Image: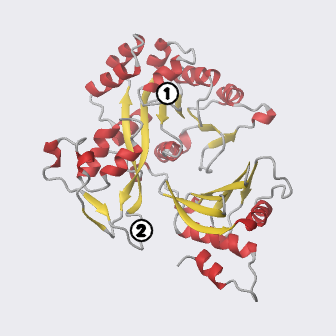
């Protein structure tokens, strides 16, 4: 039984519900479950509280609908927001407190037709590991990524959907460079927002309202004599052009960009009016990232996937495979999964790939060129993990549904 349920059951006529205590219980339950987010949302007849565990929302509690205003008011006070404003979005921050296990909270309040929806993102600075070796990268990917980081210049791009581990991977890359070079290297970042403070790294947060944008920050940063530049995200042609130019002029640039696929990054940048010859010269590699849930080590057992799913697996691969699935237990909150790991696709821009980019080949053709040059795909790497019993075929298909 979680703290929220225990508290709600203890409420009676002589002990009325205290909203502050209820909010504390919700936060404590989410932190103990290692949730990344809490969603508090008014539905038709109840307030549903859900937590995101390993990337998937799970219901935590249902509360009476008439508590919504009080819940929102309490959380706004904690995040130093305007409590009486209910018709506009608001964002705030709750500093780390021992009461909630030392985590920081980022609060987002959004008005809906049923009332305000509140999403609380949980950051635990103590449990964040920025060690490249612990991210779960495939061995070949890790080796290639480290090799690209050792180059003095070039542009390394990471792509993947929101919440796929791009920021963590970039922070791990910067930490790797700091550990390797110490005080002899100058590293600067421009981010929106700065997620964590890294030692020996100059981090800046953009403020569009004050006209401190990515392009303006980067133009100024180029006069700061940086060797490594991290750009939180390439969103517009001007930022993309500066990043490419920096990669061509002796800087190592690391950034993220949203694209439909790993090879689709080049089409996205060409659509930003960047010339293919610049891209082929500046970009060293593109890392496609996804996060998949891994089987719970306490309840994983042999499992036979549905016949329809097995049709996607080569018959010869199934023979001798160690197919497993978590049955669900108290340790994994009956989800069957016990954490997440990275699933990657590392596209290296070599001479063959440069020629293909110069020819403005379509994305599918570029993907085939990368595969012919030895790039294991997300699906191939995911299937290997399924056959080793690390995760399930259902999970890989769920995460890669848009890529297959």
Of residues 400 and 345, the one nearer the viewer is 400
Q: Find residue 12 and report its horizontal and vertical position in percent.
A: 71, 86
**On the rendered structure, is 369 left or right of 193?**
left
In the structure shown, which secondary structural element does the residue marked by tag 1 occupy?
A: strand
In the structure shown, which secondary structural element does the residue marked by tag 2 occupy?
A: loop
Mark 1–mark 2 CB contact (< 8 Å):
no
Of residues 187 and 397, the one nearer the viewer is 397
Q: Residues within 10 Å of mark 2 (few under 14, many from 20)?
A: some
Q: Find residue 247 and report its horizontal and vertical position in percent.
A: 52, 24
> What separation in Å lies between label 1 and label 2 (alpha carbons)?
43 Å
Q: Find residue 261 and report its horizontal and vertical position in percent.
A: 43, 31
Q: Is residue 220 visible?
A: yes
Residue sticking out furthest to the bottom = 14
| Residue drawn at x 32%, y 17% as measured from the top left | 352
Say the numbered circle drawn on residue 155: 1
For residue 95, above or below residue 278: below
**Res 190 quadrant in image:** top right
**On the rendered structure, is 339 left or right of 139?**
right
> Which colour scheme appears in the figure?
secondary structure
| Residue drawn at x 52%, y 21% as measured from the top left | 269
For residue 399, above or below residue 247: below
For residue 111, above or below residue 10: above
Residue marked by disc 2: 334
């Amino acid at each position: 039984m979680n703290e929220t349920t225990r508290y709600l059951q203890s409420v009676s006529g002589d002990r009325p519900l205290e909203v502050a205590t209820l909010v504390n219980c919700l936060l404590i339950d989410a932190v103990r479950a290692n949730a990344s987010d809490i969603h508090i949302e008014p539905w038709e007849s109840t307030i549903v509280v859900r937590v995101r565990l390993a990337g998937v929302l799970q219901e935590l509690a249902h509360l009476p609908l008439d508590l919504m205003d009080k819940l929102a008011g309490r959380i706004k006070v904690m995040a130093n927001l305007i409590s009486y404003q209910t018709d506009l979005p608001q964002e705030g921050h709750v500093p780390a407190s021992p009461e909630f296990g030392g985590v920081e909270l980022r609060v987002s309040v959004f008005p809906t037709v049923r009332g305000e929806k509140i999403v609380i993102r949980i950051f635990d600075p103590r449990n964040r590991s920025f060690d490249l070796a612990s991210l779960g990268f495939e061995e070949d990917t890790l080796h290639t990524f480290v090799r690209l980081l050792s180059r003095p210049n070039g542009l390394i791009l990471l792509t993947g959907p929101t919440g796929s581990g791009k920021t963590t991977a970039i922070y791990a890359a910067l930490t790797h460079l700091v550990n390797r070079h110490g005080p002899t290297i100058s590293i600067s970042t421009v981010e929106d927002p700065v997620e964590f403070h890294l030692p020996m790294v100059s981090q800046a947060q953009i403020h569009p309202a004050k006209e401190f944008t990515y392009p303006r920050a980067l133009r100024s940063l180029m006069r700061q004599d940086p060797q490594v530049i991290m750009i939180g995200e390439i969103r517009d042609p001007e930022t993309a052009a500066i990043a490419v130019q920096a990669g061509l002029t002796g800087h190592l640039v690391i950034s993220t960009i949203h694209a439909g696929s790993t090879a689709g990054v080049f089409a996205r940048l060409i659509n930003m009016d960047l010339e293919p010859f610049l891209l082929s010269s500046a970009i060293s590699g593109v890392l496609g990232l996804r996060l998949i849930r891994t089987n719970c080590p306490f309840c994983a057992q042999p499992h036979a996937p549905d016949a329809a799913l097995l049709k996607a697996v080569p018959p010869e691969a199934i023979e001798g495979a160690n197919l497993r699935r978590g049955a669900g237990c108290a340790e994994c909150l009956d989800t069957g999964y016990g954490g997440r790991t990275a699933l990657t696709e590392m596209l290296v821009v070599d001479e063959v790939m440069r020629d293909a980019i110069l020819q403005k080949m379509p994305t599918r053709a570029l993907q085939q060129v990368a595969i012919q040059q030895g790039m294991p795909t997300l699906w191939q790497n995911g299937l290997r993990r399924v056959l080793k019993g690390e995760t399930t075929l259902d999970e890989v298909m769920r995460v890669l549904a848009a890529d297959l």
